[in-house]
Amino acid sequence: MAILFSNRTRGGEKAAWILACIFISWFAWVFYLLLAPLKKD
């Protein structure tokens, strides 16, 4: 959300950063679901 209101980037660069953050966080969530239980009881 901070990227959306930031003045550091504009236009396509801002959109790319927002999409990257969404994709990377979603991708990390998938890895968490697959790899989180590393230890077995």
Image (cartoon, rainbow, N blue to C red):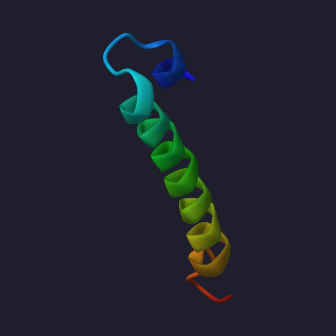
Specify the quadrant of the image occupied by residue 17.
Answer: top left
Please identify the residue farthest to the bottom as the structure is shown.
40
Up-down: is 25 above or below 18?
A: below
In this view of the protein, which residue sits in the foreground, 28 or 5? Answer: 5
* Percent x, y of residue 8: 31, 16
Image x and y of residue 29, in percent: 62, 61
- Name the side, left or right, on which 28 lies relative to 16: right
Q: Is residue 9 left or right of residue 30?
A: left
Q: In which quarter of the image is the C terminus?
A: bottom right
Residue at 37% across, 34% down: 13
Residue lying at 47% horizontally and 23% vertically, measured from the top left? 3
Q: 18 or 32, which is in the foreground?
A: 18
Question: How many labels sit on residues?
Answer: 0
Residue displayed at 54% across by 62% down: 28
11 on left or right of 37: left
Percent coordinates x, y for residue 27 in the rendering = 56, 64
Relative to residue 41, is residue 3 depicted above or below? above
Image coords of residue 33 (percent x, y): 67, 72
User: In the image, 20: left or right of 8?
Assistant: right
The residue sitting at the front extreme is 11
The residue lying furthest to the left in this view is: 8
**Residue at horizontal 49%, vertical 44%?**
21
Depth order, front residue of 13/31: 13
Q: In this view, does 7 lie above or below 9?
A: above
